[in-house]
Amino acid sequence: GNVIKPDQTYVVHEEDSSVTLSCSFSASGRTDYLHWYRQYGRSKPEFLVLTYDTAKGAQRSDVDPRFSVNIPKREHVDLEISSAAVSDSALYYCALVVAAQ
């Protein structure tokens, strides 16, 4: 089956540091689309950035250029936040969409 899960469930960093949130996934589609979302409190999740399992380089977010997504190794996706701010404190979701074969 298709599975995606966070590598950590709680992350704490100092302000202005670089933060990496990671998810591991396994999928059986022809192309796997990997999404990251952020959610504050009871607000709806906000889309941050999308990449593909075949991406060769990091994809920068159009929402905030401090956010980029990278696939450093097979079946592993990272959300990288440069210059983390207190306002980045939120719930982050990694999501997997698998195209039919």
Image (tube, helix red, strand yellow):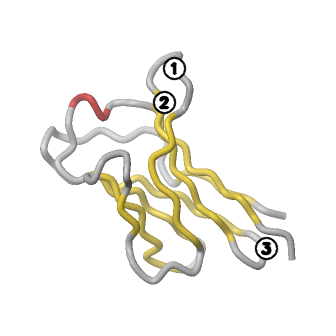
For label 2, the residue is 39
Question: Looking at the figure, which quarter contains the C terminus?
Answer: bottom right
Residue 93, given in percent of the width and then of the height, sits at 54, 43
Question: Which structural element holds mark 1?
Answer: loop
Q: Which mark is residue 9?
A: none
Left or right: residue 42 versus residue 89 is right
Residue drawn at (44%, 24%) of the image? 40
Q: Nearer the viewer, residue 85 or 33?
A: 33
| Labels 3 & 1 near each other (Cβ < 8 A) | no
Q: Amino acid at mark 1?
A: Ser
Answer few, some or many: residues within 10 Å of disc 1's Cα (few below 14, many 20 plus, some between 14 and 19). few
Q: Amino acid at mark 3?
A: Gly
- In 3D space, how far apart are the residues under numbered discs 1 and 2 (Cα atoms)? 6 Å
- In 3D space, how far apart are the residues under numbered discs 3 and 1 (Cα atoms)? 31 Å
Identify the residue at the far left of this view: 16
For label 1, the residue is 43
Q: Which mark is residue 29?
A: 3
Identify the residue at the far front of this view: 62
| Labels 1 & 2 near each other (Cβ < 8 A) | yes
Question: Looking at the figure, which quarter contains the N terminus?
Answer: bottom right
Q: Is residue 66 above or below residue 25?
A: above
Residue drawn at (39%, 79%) of the image? 57
